[in-house]
Image (cartoon, rainbow, N blue to C red):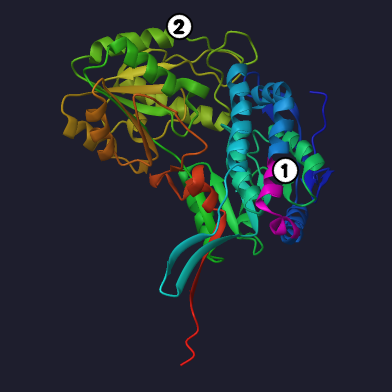
């Protein structure tokens, strides 16, 4: 790619101390060189955000929201360019990349409409109690490689609207779209309000433990999230963690098998299964189990797996070599233990391609069932009783999301109430809305993203409790 990318520090696009190559996961060829920050540049970015904070936080909500809307407009104007670059560095099919970019503008627009107004909690008998919220300061945003644009906007929108400033650090395998967005920010935002540094995971500890960072917003693996939380402990920093999931789909026997298979396949295989809330294990009632298995196997065999930039591709590569090797290991173990319905064989070609694979009849303690695969390999498991399947779905250290499928919506909602997850969808999947809070339970996260609750994560609540002065 004939384009030079630069870091964004204090409103200026600058060269990195060094650079590293970013690979296209479909070809393993270099997309572009990424500037690599050193510790001095990280400190400069944090200092710039700290210096910009007083003036930015002093602006009105309406003023700050207007800037966020300008960012959304600029991103939308260049959506085709962003989508092509996203496919090149991340691997997802082009139409899915376009969806991510458009969705990112929706997120920014949604947060631009939100406010955290002063709230009267009590007003009687001369006693007035109010709650008001103030921005925190400098936010460190650490984003992953599966949705590098929209997951940044999930953090940037509420951060800016509430009056905070940001230092963003994208994943080293997908930094380019963030740096392209930095070009827009350099033209629109006041200097220092938004800064971008890139590394190969050397600066994470320095960023999260820095005394001038007030909050850390992290999306990524549970293991790394635990390290982020530990790093924030000494400074008692505010932390939002959106972590891993092993999301279960429960398919009741009253659902037509072909309908259920199509819904589950889509929920499991979008972005090659690399979604924190993708369906990671499907529990299907014994009365429709074999028909479901046959239907979902046909869908897997019909999928078009190739370079995401090619027309008609439905599943691209796994994003990076490390993740490819992890999924490959889980796949090999599952093939040895279960019944392969579709896929299972890795192609001999460049790129990190894994065909959509469906494996039935695995034991509940199989690694593919217990762990988060984060790839296009799905175990399909049989159940007969509701109590049993709820217990099996909940038997996980994760609790991010889940789904229940049934023609009896009320019964499905009753089951959903028993599933220990931050979000449980009924007869739908991936129904993420920027105006609704998104949380994880257990080891799937801490705090909320999106919605009013997500906005509040970027503020400090203060209570003022006043009574009239007694003069006697």
Residue at 71% from the left image edge and 48% from the top image edge: 63
Q: Is residue 34 above or below residue 358?
A: below
Residue at 48% from the left image edge and 52% from the top image edge: 226
Residue at 59% from the left image edge and 29% from the top image edge: 103
Please state the horizontal and vertical placement of residue 298, each as a whole percent of the image. Answer: 38, 7
**Magenta span main SS:** helix
Q: Compare residues 329 and 144 and report the one nearer the observer.
A: 144
Q: Is residue 59 above or below residue 421?
A: below
Q: Compare residues 329 and 442 and report the one nearer the observer.
A: 442
- State left or right for residue 447 relative to residue 407: right
Q: Which of marks 2 and 1 is nearer the N terminus?
A: 1
Please state the horizontal and vertical placement of residue 196, each as a whole percent of the image. Answer: 72, 45
- State left or right for residue 183 relative to residue 436: right
Residue position marked by numbered label 2 in the rendering: 302
The magenta segment: 55-68
Residue 231 visible somewhere in the drawing: no
Tell me how many marks there are. Answer: 2
Q: Residue 417 carries which label?
A: none
Residue position marked by numbered label 1 in the rendering: 67
For residue 440, what is the image quadrant?
top left
Q: Is residue 62 magenta?
A: yes
Q: Compare residues 103 and 124 and report the one nearer the observer.
A: 124
Q: How far apart are marks 2 and 1 (CA)?
A: 45 Å
Q: Does the magenta stretch include residue 6?
A: no
Q: Compare residues 29 and 47 and report the one nearer the observer.
A: 47
């Amino acid at each position: 790619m004939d384009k030079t990318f630069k870091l964004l520090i204090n409103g200026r696009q600058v060269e990195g101390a060094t650079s590293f190559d970013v690979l296209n996961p479909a070809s393993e060829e270099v997309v572009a060189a990424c500037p690599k920050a050193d510790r001095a540049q990280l400190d400069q970015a944090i200092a710039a955000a700290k210096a910009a904070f007083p003036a930015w936080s002093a602006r009105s909500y309406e003023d700050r929201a207007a800037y966020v809307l300008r960012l959304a407009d600029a991103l939308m104007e260049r959506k085709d360019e962003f989508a092509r670059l996203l496919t090149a560095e991340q691997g997802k099919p082009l139409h899915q990349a376009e969806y991510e970019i458009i969705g990112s503008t929706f997120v920014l627009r949604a947060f631009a409409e939100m406010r955290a107004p002063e709230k009267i909690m009590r007003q009687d008998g001369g006693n007035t109690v109010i709650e008001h919220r103030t921005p925190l300061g400098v936010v460190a945003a650490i984003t992953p490689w599966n949705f590098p644009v929209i997951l940044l906007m999930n953090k940037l929108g509420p951060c800016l609207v509430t009056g905070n400033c940001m230092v963003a650090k994208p994943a080293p395998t997908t930094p380019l779209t963030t740096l392209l967005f930095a070009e827009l920010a350099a033209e629109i935002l006041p200097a220092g309000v938004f800064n971008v540094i890139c590394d190969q995971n050397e600066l994470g500890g320095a960023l999260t433990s820095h005394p001038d960072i007030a909050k850390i917003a992290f999306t990524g693996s549970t293991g790394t999230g635990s390290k982020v939380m530990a790093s924030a402990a000494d400074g008692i920093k505010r932390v939002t963690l959106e972590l891993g999931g092993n999301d279960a789909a429960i398919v009741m026997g009253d659902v037509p098998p072909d309908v259920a298979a199509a819904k589950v396949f889509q929920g499991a295989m979008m972005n090659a299964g690399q979604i924190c809330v993708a369906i990671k294990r499907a529990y299907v009632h014994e009365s429709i189990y074999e028909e479901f298995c046959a239907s979902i196997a046909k869908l897997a065999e019909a999928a078009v797996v190739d370079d995401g930039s090619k027309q008609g591709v439905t599943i691209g590569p796994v994003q990076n070599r490390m993740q490819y090797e992890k999924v490959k290991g889980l796949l090999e173990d599952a093939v040895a233990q279960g019944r392969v319905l579709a896929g299972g064989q890795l192609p001999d070609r460049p790129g990190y391609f894994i065909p959509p694979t469906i494996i039935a009849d695995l034991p509940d303690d199989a690694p593919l069932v217990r762990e988060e695969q984060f790839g296009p390999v799905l175990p399909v498991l049989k159940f007969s009783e509701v109590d049993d399947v709820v217990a099996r779905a909940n038997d996980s250290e994760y609790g991010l999301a889940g789904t229940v499928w049934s023609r009896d919506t009320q019964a499905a909602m009753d089951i959903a109430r028993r599933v220990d997850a931050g979000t449980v969808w009924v007869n739908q999947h991936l129904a993420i809305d920027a105006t609704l809070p998104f949380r994880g339970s257990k080891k799937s996260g801490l705090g909320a993203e999106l919605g009013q609750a997500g906005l509040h994560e970027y503020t400090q609540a203060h209570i003022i409790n006043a009574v009239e002065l007694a003069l006697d």
